[in-house]
Image: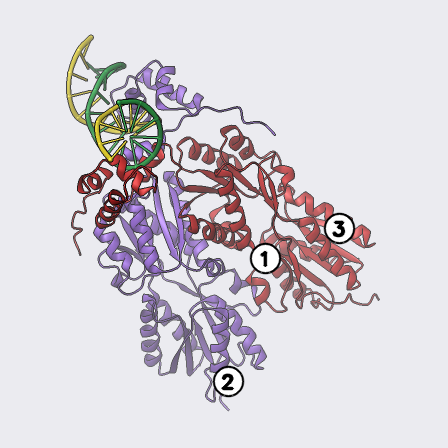
Chain colours: A red, B purple, C yellow, D green
DNA sequence: TTGTACGCGTTATCAC
DNA sequence: GTGATAACGCGTACAA
């Protein structure tokens, strides 16, 4: 419709000519450096604004400045990605931090951790990003060696034990797990089961250990069943566990989706929640609040976590030494899905 | 731990030297252009691979190539963003398309449409993106004039009527609305209410009109109540509507979150779903499948929509003329929340 | 303050 | 047809 009126591209040279000065002065004026008279500075800023000029970021980057961009690669199937509320919350938090520094977030979704390492390598070589955020670390994750060899600023979101000395933002999953187990113990439950994430994630072992320790400390019978975090595997695990002879009366899930489907599974098996079985979810998304009965969950503020991680990454980019930072510990938000253990028959 | 062994940055000159040729030949060889003997080409590719070199994208961009990046600006509060499943699904789809072309997605979250237009202007001036995706259009959206004046490739995700001649990917919301109304009518409902999004979104009017036409055509009493799409406003609307004297027996919500909270509201009012009132949601996320009773919903494949929109944007970047493309129409997925209308007393 | 070399690929031009 | 030389794009930073 409106046939674009050929907006010619404005360069620093145009601004310099129009302001009757050199490109150097324009550059200095714009970046607020000394070496320009305030009269010239005024004139340059006025002209720049009038012409609507902003420096080509490619040129800045080439000249040695940063790319004003941080990168986040996610190794996920796009379909799964859209189911997990975690990532959008995390990204939203990252954006909240970046907005204040007018930096951008470059996002890429790849099939696996190997491709993730490649993407980071490419980004670094092509200087598209000033730093990267790493999530979902595996033990001996290939990304670690890529960023440390390349000297690319990075922040690991996860336990320091797998971060090989990089800056880390982590949550105390062990403490959170303990809270959940103690909550069940306090309600009189004697048999509890953890429905867990795959072993390949670094955090899994941490939660596993904490679960076993806490259960032993409280004198509870305990067990761990493995899933792939999907709805189906959650439902299957719940069904198996709840129909076994000495079924547990307390279940702790490693995410919220599985906990929600377990509500339905329990219902199908004729078990009442929390009358016959109590359920605790990990990650307190909208889901937990909206289902009936509401799910007791270990909630943490993922948006804040993303903002925190991004802030630390900016520090590292600015030259901060590696350090570890603990984010808020997930807290138990009690709702209707947990209650007193049923009386033994 | 591993004290970064100073990986020097590799440039095209390094590759040229190592391959005993000129930088020009390296460039030609890498980009598969003619003018290089296959022997030289082989050698260059081998060296490039060995040195792990990939061209600095800043330099390419400066030399006139594209930025290999598309932009997506969202005008949302980060907290809200993380609640709506739509965006993560959309982004996941976009990524699926971009992955095949090894392009990146630059994401920015800003408070309002004005800031959105600014961000797009900045991106364009600094040549950071080759094109942008526009979602949630307002009537007379400031972004439209920015992209058309700048001649920046863009694709509007929304109704062509507000896209001012830009390439558009849209879903037939009117037809979907009609389906939902006819479904309720077929079940014998005589009074239906639409719990709608704010007027400021362009799609709202389209759905409003379709709702009224379809209800009139089916001879139903009908009404529209306005919300801000939040949980709270959904609950309030449901409460008001359902406690009115001649309460409707069929409700059509403009998103899924409100429909889910309405289940709880109905329960609190002592109304059975679907015995006393039938509920239909718009956007069929996991939520609709996991609640009890399952929610009948107008579902569309948002991941596919994102992939489609990105594909069209790549076409526009490659020079395609503006055109409109209809994505799949949302279809009614019937679950337990809709049933025969209660018998009038 | 300003001229100018530099960063790094791309492409037009030229010599072989 | 092959391959090399050089100009270009655009800001930055140092020397003059």
> Which residue is more in the foreground, B120 or B166?
B120
* Mark 3 vs 1, N-terminal side: 3
Crowd band around label 2 with a 10 angstrom C-alpha radius: few (<14), some (14–19), many (20+): few
Q: Are marks 3 and 1 on the same chain?
A: yes
Q: Which residue is mark 3?
A: A223
Q: Which residue is mark 1?
A: A257
What is the x, y in percent for residue D4? 26, 14
Q: Which residue is mark 2?
A: B243
Local secondary structure at mark 1: helix
Residue at point 34%, 41% (across, down): A31
Question: Which image quarter is the N terminus of chain B in?
Answer: top right
What residue occupies the far bottom of the structure in this picture? Answer: B345
Q: Is residue B308 above or below residue B237?
A: above
Image side of residue B213 versus residue A20, left or right:
right
Q: Is residue A263 above or below residue B213?
A: above
Q: Is residue B208 above or below residue B152?
A: below
């Amino acid at each position: 419709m409106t046939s674009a009126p050929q907006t010619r591209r404005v360069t620093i040279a145009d601004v310099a000519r129009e302001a009757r000065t050199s490109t150097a002065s324009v550059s200095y004026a714009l970046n607020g450096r000394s070496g320009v008279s305030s009269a010239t500075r005024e004139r340059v800023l006025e002209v720049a604004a009038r012409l609507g000029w902003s420096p080509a970021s490619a040129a800045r980057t080439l000249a040695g400045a940063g790319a004003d961009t941080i990168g986040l690669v996610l190794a996920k199937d796009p379909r799964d990605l859209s189911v997990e509320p975690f990532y959008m919350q995390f990204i939203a938090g990252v954006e909240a931090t970046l907005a204040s520094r007018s930096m951008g977030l470059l996002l890429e979704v790849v099939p696996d951790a190997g491709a993730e390492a490649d993407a980071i390598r490419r980004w670094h070589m092509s200087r598209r990003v000033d730093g990267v955020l790493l999530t979902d670390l595996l033990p001996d994750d290939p990304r670690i060696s890529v960023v440390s060899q390349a000297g690319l600023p990075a922040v690991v979101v996860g336990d320091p034990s797998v971060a090989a000395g990089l800056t880390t933002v982590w949550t105390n999953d062990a403490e959170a797990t303990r809270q959940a187990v103690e909550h069940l113990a306090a309600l009189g439950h004697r048999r509890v089961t953890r429905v867990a994430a795959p072993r390949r994630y670094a955090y899994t072992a941490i939660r596993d250990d904490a679960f076993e320790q806490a259960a032993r400390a409280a004198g509870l019978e305990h067990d761990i069943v493995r899933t792939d975090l999907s709805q189906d595997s959650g439902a299957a695990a719940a069904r198996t566990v709840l129909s076994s002879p000495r079924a547990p009366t307390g279940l702790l899930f490693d995410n919220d989706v599985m906990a929600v489907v377990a509500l339905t599974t329990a219902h199908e098996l004729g078990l009442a929640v929390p009358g016959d079985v109590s359920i605790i979810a990990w990650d307190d998304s909208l889901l937990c609040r909206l289902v009936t009965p509401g799910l007791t969950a270990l909630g943490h503020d993922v948006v804040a976590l993303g903002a925190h991680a991004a802030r630390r990454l900016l520090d590292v980019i600015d030259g901060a030494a590696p350090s570890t930072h603990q984010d808020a510990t997930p807290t138990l938000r009690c709702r209707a899905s947990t209650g007193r253990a049923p009386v033994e028959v």
